[in-house]
Image (cartoon, grey):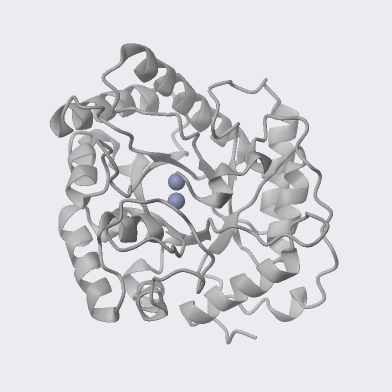
Amino acid sequence: MNSNIEESPEHNIGESSAPSRQPASFPTSHQTSTLSADRRIGRHVSIGSKPVKAAAIAREIGCNAIQIFASNPTGWRLPADDPVACAAFARAARDCGLDPVVIHAPYLINLASPDEIIWEKSITLLRWTLQRGGLLGARYVVFHTGSHRGSGVDAGIARIAQAIARILAETPPEVILLLENDVGAGNSLGHSFENIAAVLELLPGYVGRLGVCLDTAHLWGAGHDISSAEAVQLALQQFDEAVGLERLKVIHLNDTAMALGSHRDEHARIGEGIIPEEGLRALLRDPRLAHAAVLLETPTKTGSDGKEDWQHEQRHLQRVKGLMGLSAPH
Ligand SMILES: [Zn+2]
Ligand SMILES: [Zn+2]
């Protein structure tokens, strides 16, 4: 939740003052499209007030999947209906070959909250996010499982499941809700695979509409060792036994400078944190995860003009593709 990118006000797409994006030229874009058709890779892109342009940028830097916010990630306010803009984004994402489109839900949502007002507001906002996701052509909505605020793990888990049952009953069946794992600070849930499994087990009627997103920086922060091929095998085995690898739909690929088990959530670009490359490579190359979309949520580099350096980001993605074994990094 405290990653640089996720805190960036540029992601507050409800704000009309969001800066416009001026992608520079991308001299190598057509030479880097060596991505295998069945692996999906992309990144979180700020859509600002220009969602169609965000889709074009994602394609230009080498993505075939994308994650966006559908509203201000740190606000409760629901943006006005805008079916024309939503349809334009859905069309642009399709035209740019971006599949899946993933929506990251706002951070204020806490379905585990014992507070009635927060709980109802959370249900309203997450329900709206799935409904808007349908209009945006999204396949997945990712949300944080939240904190029980002292009411206890079992109470929190029951609360989440109860909220999800209400939300899924009133949202488009084609939009799948994903629980994201957590670093486990304070009373937050979702740092253990058993927490996630417990929620899913309470909702047996929604197997097709519920899945999981694993964030590598959150795994690390929660104390799941992914530093080597052996460690990754053990972590995946534990996830498989608790949840089932087939329920894993999205991997948030982030490095972090925080220590293993620190319960701190901060994202770094791949290779700029302390998660050993060997572990990330093993995770990305595990054939049992080949169905999952890989999305970066790393801070983007800005040039001296204060704008994102998309060419740098293109090289960053190329490096990740190298880790995945899709093409050699430049
Ligand atoms: Zn997240
Ligand atoms: Zn994440």
Q: Is residue 287 above or below residue 134?
A: below
Which image quadrant is residue 26 in? bottom right
- Quarter the C terminus occupies: bottom right
User: Residue 41: image x %, image y %?
Assistant: 54, 64
User: Residue 274: image x %, image y %?
Assistant: 41, 71
Identify the residue at horizontal 42%, vertical 59% (top origin). Answer: 251
Identify the residue at horizontal 70%, vertical 66% (top origin). Answer: 61
Q: Is residue 102 left or right of residue 204?
A: right
User: Residue 151: image x %, image y %?
Assistant: 18, 24
Q: Is residue 237 left or right of residue 290?
A: left
Identify the residue at horizontal 16%, vertical 34% (top origin). Answer: 153
Q: Is residue 93 above or below residue 163?
A: below
- Quarter the N terminus occupies: top left
Identify the residue at horizontal 45%, vertical 19% (top origin). Answer: 124
Q: How many marks?
A: 0
User: Residue 170: image x %, image y %?
Assistant: 42, 22
